[in-house]
Amino acid sequence: MIDDALLISELSFKAVRSSGAGGQHVNKVASKVELSFSILESSALNEGQKGRLITKLQPRLTKNQVLLLQCGESRSQHKNKELVISRFLYILKEGLKVSKKRRPTKIPKSAIKKRLKGKRVVSERKASRRKPNLE
């Protein structure tokens, strides 16, 4: 398992002005928090974990394999920082989960027989609607 405290120590934060409601308050306070985490430079993750994260989080990463998250939901910078850290930890844990390999199941013979019997019944029903061949 990974050490959350070590991961949090590797994060870098930047506070910027948030958009949205708030009137004049929004124009003078930097309450939105941007988090950046470089997967390649992390010492909390081993090489296998880094590779798994890079493949699973590929759409969310920059060209330099940096994960960027931002939160501007609250008017409080501290609350936004807490929210973005919890979101980051959740994304990382989900990215590190190893999914089970799917084993395809075999179709039971009874299901195949039932399907073919149904096809035969429909075929006979349609055949009985045809005009008889008088030749």
Image: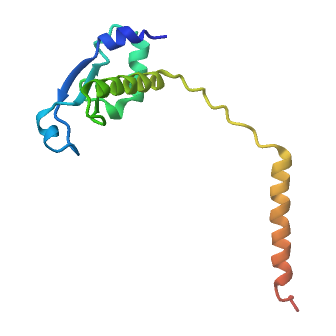
Q: Which residue occupies the foreground of this view, 74 or 70?
A: 74
Q: Quadrant of residue 79?
A: top left
- Where residue 102 sits in the image (x, y, percent)? 63, 32
Visible in this render: residue 99?
yes
Count up the numbered dots. 0
Quadrant position of the C terminus in the picture = bottom right
Residue 114 vertical placement versus 39 (above, below): below
What residue lies at 83% left-to-right and 83% top-to-bottom?
Answer: 129
- Where residue 131 sits in the image (x, y, percent)? 83, 89
Q: Which residue occupies the foreground of this view, 2 or 112?
A: 2
What residue lies at 83% left-to-right and 78% top-to-bottom?
Answer: 127
What residue lies at 82% left-to-right and 49% top-to-bottom?
Answer: 111
| Residue 18 appears left or right of 98 | left
Q: Which residue occupies the foreground of this view, 24 or 110?
A: 24
- Where residue 122 sits in the image (x, y, percent)? 81, 70
Visible in this render: residue 45?
no
- Where residue 1 sits in the image (x, y, percent)? 49, 10
What residue lies at 35% left-to-right and 31% top-to-bottom?
Answer: 58
Q: Quadrant of residue 4?
A: top left
| Residue 119 appears left or right of 53 | right
| Residue 104 appears left or right of 19 | right
